[in-house]
Image (cartoon, rainbow, N blue to C red):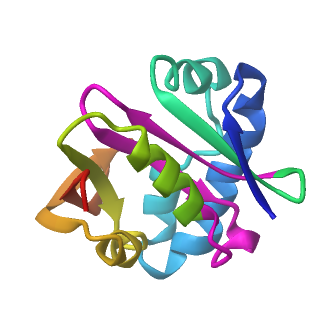
Amino acid sequence: MIALRSMAPEDAPALAALFFETVHNVCGKDYNPAQLDAWAPADRDLAAWAASFQGRTALVALWDGEIAGFGDLDREAGYLDRLYVRWDLQGRGIASALCDALEAACPAERITVHASLTALPFFEGRGYRVVRQQQVVRRGVTLTNFLMERPTAL
């Protein structure tokens, strides 16, 4: 059973761990170890991580009462920033539930996202289209992702 709630500041350590574990366990087929470490480093500044969710619609998904995923949206910009589901709970509708709620909360005409190679099929299945492929640099390492968008009213 999936339940959603607003993110709380005290969620930061659990969400940082979920982010690290998910990137390193799910995205290895699309990115090499150096890219995974640059994207999701083990040495996360938890105060900065928690602060990065401020002023956004930020949701936590619970599966059987335990944190199973999270996502956040900059409502004003229409930017879906993060959407991650625990690596061992993939494919159970958790990302879709989070995305449905975040998209519904967006007052902008369009929603944009920077999707990883791994997440590209998920967002394409939701009606997002690729605007452009791009190379981003994280901690001196280049990663490929995709700027995608879709109208809020589908």
Q: Outermost residue, left direction?
A: 131
Q: Quadrant of the C terminus?
A: bottom left
- The residue range painted magenta reads 67-94
26 or 35, which is in the foreground? Answer: 26
The answer to whether residue 70 is magenta is yes
Asked if residue 92 is positioned above or below residue 135 in the image, the reply reads: below
Q: Camera-side residue: 106 or 46?
A: 106
Q: Kindly identify the residue that appears in the image at 45 percent across and 17 percent down.
A: 55
> Which image quarter is the N terminus in?
bottom right
Is residue 58 shown to the viewer in this render? yes
Q: In the figure, is residue 130 to the left or right of 28?
A: left
Identify the residue at image location x=53%, y=75%: 28
Residue 11: x and y in percent read 75, 31
Residue 93 location, x and y as percent? 62, 71
- For this view, does 39 lie left or right of residue 112? right
Is 17 situated left or right of 49 in this image?
Answer: right
Write down the quadrant of residue 14 in the picture.
Answer: top right
Q: Residue at x 66, y 32 (%)?
A: 6
Name the residue located 29 percent from the left edge and 75 percent from the top edge.
Answer: 124
Q: List x then y, in percent, for residue 45.
A: 62, 25
